[in-house]
Image: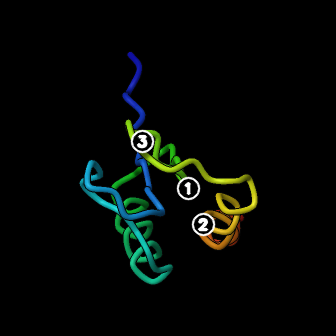
Amino acid sequence: QHAPLWMAVMNMFSDIFSKQNFQNIEDFQKEIQILDHHGIAIIDVVGESTHTGAVPLSSQEEWERVKTPLHFLAEYFQD
């Protein structure tokens, strides 16, 4: 029997359609620690909103939003 894998979507922007978003790294880090404790298996770090009417970002703008969280994840889960 296969156990389900839990996934978290971490939105790194403010969006009225997002139930949870992270605009500072401290809140992101706290949430990752909670999710890790509960056995999260997949983490999707999102830098750009895709809802209707959202303003598209350049690749550089999106990278600026996600690079610090991704570096944190790489260190946190390095083992």
Residue displayed at 35% across by 67% down: 34
Label 1 to label 2, Cα distance in Å? 5 Å
Residue 65 percent coordinates (x, y): 60, 66
Residue 4 percent coordinates (x, y): 37, 28
Q: From the viewer's perspective, is the residue at label 2 or at label 3 nearer?
A: 2
**Residue at mark 1:** 47
Task: Give the amino acid at mark 2.
Answer: Arg
Residue in the foreground of this view, choosing between 17 and 2: 17
Alpha-carbon neighbours of circle 3 within 10 Å: few (<14), some, or many (≥20)? few
Residue 19 percent coordinates (x, y): 24, 54
Above or below, comparing residue 54 to residue 26 in the picture: above
* Number of the label disc, if any, that sits on residue 65: 2
Alpha-carbon neighbours of circle 2 within 10 Å: few (<14), some, or many (≥20)? many
Residue in the foreground of this view, choosing between 51 and 35: 51
Query: Image quadrant for the N terminus?
Result: top left
* Number of the label disc, if any, that sits on residue 7: 3
Residue in the foreground of this view, choosing between 23 and 5: 23
Above or below, comparing residue 35 to residue 27 in the picture: above
Task: Give the amino acid at mark 1.
Answer: Gly
Task: Give the amino acid at mark 3.
Answer: Met
Residue displayed at 29% across by 52% down: 18
Alpha-carbon neighbours of circle 1 within 10 Å: few (<14), some, or many (≥20)? some
The furthest residue to the right? 60
Earlier-in-chain disc, 2 versus 3: 3
The furthest residue to the bottom? 26
Query: Image quadrant for the C terminus?
Result: bottom right
Circles 1 and 2: CB atoms closer than 8 Å: yes
